Image (spheres, grey):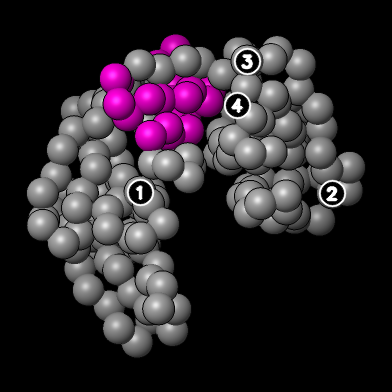
Amino acid sequence: KRYVVLSQYTKSKQSKILIADYTLTYRKTVISGGLNIFPKWADKNQRGIYYTKIGRKPTLYYYNIYSGKRRRVASSDGMIICSDVSRDGKKLLLTKAPYGQPDIYLYNITNGSERRLTFYSGIDVSGQFVDGEKAIVFVSDRLGSPNIFKLKIGGRGVSQLVYHGRNNSSCTAYGKYIVYTSRE
């Protein structure tokens, strides 16, 4: 009943975005031409996706999979990735690197405003909403290697969530749970 969305490299500087069932038996290309990466479902009904197109300046697009219409959301020097979408679809957590190192931003779809949430001179990436969208979890190298941290939206202090492993390089959240990868 639900689909997955993924990016598949086809050749140098080329990739396509596919929608597939969980077994990957059914696959349909929805976006091709250029380097299209980091797709993310835009809503729980799976009617649209956000994805990054790499060109002269990385740009985030919204694509409606039923109408085929695409619209530009935002762009940024360095990188721009949508890592999570709020339940109502009105807010995005973006990883952007306009000043060299990536930080996490809260982007409002309704009015186009954004707010920088993390202010770290190293790497902060992969923000995910938690606690009823009042906080985020994310990956940061602030302890010397990647680990999972939590930040209350509007707050400044971060707290470490994982104390096991020395290379916890990705995470996702679902309700009150987080799932993370650890290389040991």
- Tell which of 152 and 57 is nearer to you: 152
How far apart in space, not on screen, are marks 1 and 3 (Cα)?
Answer: 24 Å
Circles 2 and 3 in contact, beta carbons < 8 Å: no
Label 2 crowd bin: few (<14), some (14–19), many (20+), radius 10 Å: few
Give the residue at mark 2: 165
Mark 2 and mark 4 in contact? Answer it, CB < 8 Å.
no
- Residue identifier under label 4: 123
Q: Which residues are magenta?
A: 90-112
Does residue 173 sit above or below 132 in this rendering? below
Image location (x, y in percent) of residue 47: 27, 58
1 or 3: tag closer to the N-terminus: 1
Badge 1 vs badge 2, beta-carbon distance below 8 Å: no
User: Is residue 92 inside the magenta stretch?
Assistant: yes
Q: Which residue is mark 3?
A: 154
In contact (CB < 8 Å): disc 1 and disc 3: no
Could you tell me if the residues under marks 3 and 4 are in contact, i.e. CB atoms within 8 Å? no
The residue under label 1 is 42
Determine whether, in the image, residue 111 is placed left or right of residue 83: left
Badge 4, how many Cα within 10 Å: few under 14, some, many 20+? many
Q: Is residue 95 left or right of residue 122?
A: left
Residue 117 drawn at (x, y percent): 57, 18
Secondary structure at badge 1 equals: loop
Q: Earlier in the sequence, mark 3 or mark 4?
A: 4
Quarter of the image with the N terminus is bottom left
Q: Position of residue 25 (x, y in %)?
A: 34, 87
* Residue at the (74%, 33%) spot, across then down: 149
